[in-house]
């Protein structure tokens, strides 16, 4: 049926999208019609239920809302005018990020990261960050994913072939579209390649200011999933899709500067690792177990953190050692940095980055001693049970909820609310009976 605009020849109303991160890092939002969102930050009303939903839109019974549990009201949402960008490689649909403000600012994921970055700034430091994400592409759509058994899902490519030039050339149209999409969205990449595992692609987002890096990472994940669906595919950022394949990482590269100089670099120190960098890494290791749930936020996250899958199993660090939780990467001042390898691709970028930086800042403030670096396989050299990372979402949530350091860095209200949401997530999954259990126990036990 023709619209009034079509009948009169008038231009359609200006339409922009706004998106705000929930606890899971999912962008929730809506179209806003007939308004220019680019001139200044505006505050609008938006349902506070977004911060009480789990990833399947079920309400988590938590107490942070200003209304009775069954009567969610509106919260103040600040639209961030500087974040507007195109999110499609065709057309000019524009997305603006937003953040909760007012009474809900201290549980807003973006607000939590800003809180941590303010703490770093109070010490005179700015953080530069680059995210890396691995994601898996399937030649399926939303209907076939539901209709087929998992073993019947077709991945974009078969079997592992990491860094494959053959596959990159064969799929050049796909890569060209991703590069074009990221260029239009002002999310420049520093690398794009096939990783080990069927249909696995890794994208390295170019480093920038920490808050902007988290904004880019959040948009990137949603943008890639939407792009894949438009192409008749499905993209997933699950931490572990199958026990037969490596997990999917969300590594975070971090450096800090003071007065325009790389504060992690000291030409007179061993390996050029400054005292500040060593304290920063020491803090990351000391508080890694207590803060782990921010970097491994889902039931599935812990199936990635196992030996032999390019993921850490204990708080450890090493020089250019990819088996460690923190990889110190020496080089010239412009590239001298660390890589926080605990996070999987399933993270909320704001919270994972708050975890990585917040723990490092605590190390600087307390002068924590850095343990010896690991030269070999960290999963072998640090195999004592007492040295392991939390083994489940339940264990990690308990450590976080009871952590005085977490309350100090992230605020008591956020720790309470996020812990409630993770307990809910654990309970939603732990009682499910899987096909593996049926195959293992049905006849024999």
Image (spheres, rainbow, N blue to C red):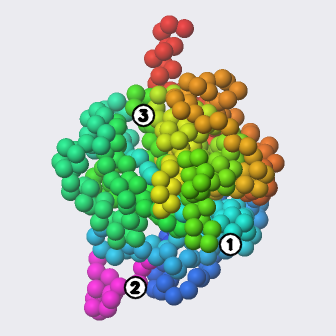
Residue lying farthest to the front in this orientation:
268
Q: Nearer the viewer, mark 2 or mark 1?
A: 1
Residue 154 falls within the magenta-colored stretch: no
**Quadrant the N terminus occupies:** bottom left
Sequence-earlier tag: 2 or 1: 2
Badge 1: how crowded within 10 Å, few (<14), some, or many (20+)? some
Sequence-earlier tag: 3 or 1: 1
Instruction: Name the mark on residue 246.
Output: 3
Instruction: Say which element carries label 1.
Output: loop
Tally of numbered tags: 3
Whole-number angstrom distance, CA of label 3 to CA of label 1 = 39 Å
Which range is magenta?
Answer: 1-16
Whole-number angstrom distance, CA of label 2 to CA of label 1 = 28 Å
x and y, in percent, of residue 432 in the image? 57, 30
Q: Provide the residue designation for mark 2.
A: 13
Q: Residue at 72% of width from left, 66% of height from top? A: 123
Q: Provide the residue designation for mark 1.
A: 101
Badge 2: how crowded within 10 Å, few (<14), some, or many (20+)? few
Residue toward you, 300 or 47: 300
Residue toward you, 324 or 427: 324
Is residue 246 visible in this depiction of the protein? yes
Residue lying farthest to the top in this orientation:
444
Sequence-earlier tag: 2 or 3: 2
Instruction: Say which element carries label 3.
Output: loop
Q: Residue at 37% of width from left, 49% of height from top? A: 202
């Amino acid at each position: 049926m023709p619209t009034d605009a079509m009948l009169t020849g008038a231009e359609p109303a200006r339409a922009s999208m706004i998106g705000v991160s929930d606890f899971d890092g999912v962008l929730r939002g809506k179209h806003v019609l007939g308004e220019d969102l680019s001139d200044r930050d505006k505050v609008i009303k938006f349902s506070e239920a977004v911060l009480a939903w789990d990833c399947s839109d079920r309400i988590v019974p938590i107490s942070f809302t200003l209304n009775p549990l069954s009567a969610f009201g509106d919260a103040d949402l600040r639209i961030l005018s500087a974040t507007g960008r195109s999110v499609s490689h065709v057309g000019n649909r524009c997305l603006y990020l937003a953040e909760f403000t007012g009474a809900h600012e201290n549980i807003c994921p973006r607000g939590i990261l800003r809180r941590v970055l303010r703490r770093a700034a109070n010490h005179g430091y700015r953080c530069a960050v680059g995210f890396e994400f691995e994601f898996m592409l399937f030649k399926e759509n939303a209907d076939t994913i539901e209709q087929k058994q998992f073993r019947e899902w077709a991945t974009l490519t078969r079997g592992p072939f990491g860094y494959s030039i053959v596959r990159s050339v064969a799929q050049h149209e796909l890569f060209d579209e991703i590069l074009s999409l990221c260029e239009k969205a002002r999310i420049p990449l520093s690398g794009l390649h096939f990783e080990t595992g069927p249909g696995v692609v890794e994208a390295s987002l170019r480093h920038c200011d920490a808050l902007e890096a988290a904004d880019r990472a959040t948009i990137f994940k949603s943008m890639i999933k939407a792009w894949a669906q438009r192409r008749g595919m499905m993209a997933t950022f699950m931490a572990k899709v199958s026990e037969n394949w490596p997990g999917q990482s969300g590594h975070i590269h971090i450096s800090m500067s003071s007065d325009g100089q790389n504060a992690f670099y000291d030409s007179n120190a061993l390996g050029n690792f400054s005292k500040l960098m060593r304290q920063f890494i020491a803090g990351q290791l000391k508080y890694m177990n207590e803060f782990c749930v921010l970097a491994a936020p889902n039931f599935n996250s812990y199936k990635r953190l196992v030996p032999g899958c390019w993921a850490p199993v204990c708080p450890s660090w090493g020089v250019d050692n990819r088996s460690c939780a923190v990889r110190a990467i020496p080089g010239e001042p412009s590239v001298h940095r660390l890589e926080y390898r605990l996070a999987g691709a399933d993270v909320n970028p704001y919270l994972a980055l708050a975890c990585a930086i917040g723990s490092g800042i605590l190390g600087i403030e307390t002068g924590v001693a850095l343990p010896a670096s690991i030269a070999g396989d960290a999963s072998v050299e640090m195999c004592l049970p007492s040295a392991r990372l939390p083994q489940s979402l339940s264990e990690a949530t308990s450590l976080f909820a009871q952590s005085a350091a977490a309350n100090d860095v992230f605020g008591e209200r956020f720790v309470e609310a996020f812990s409630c949401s993770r307990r809910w997530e654990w309970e939603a999954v732990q009682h499910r009976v899987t096909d593996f259990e049926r195959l293992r126990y049905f006849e024999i036990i």
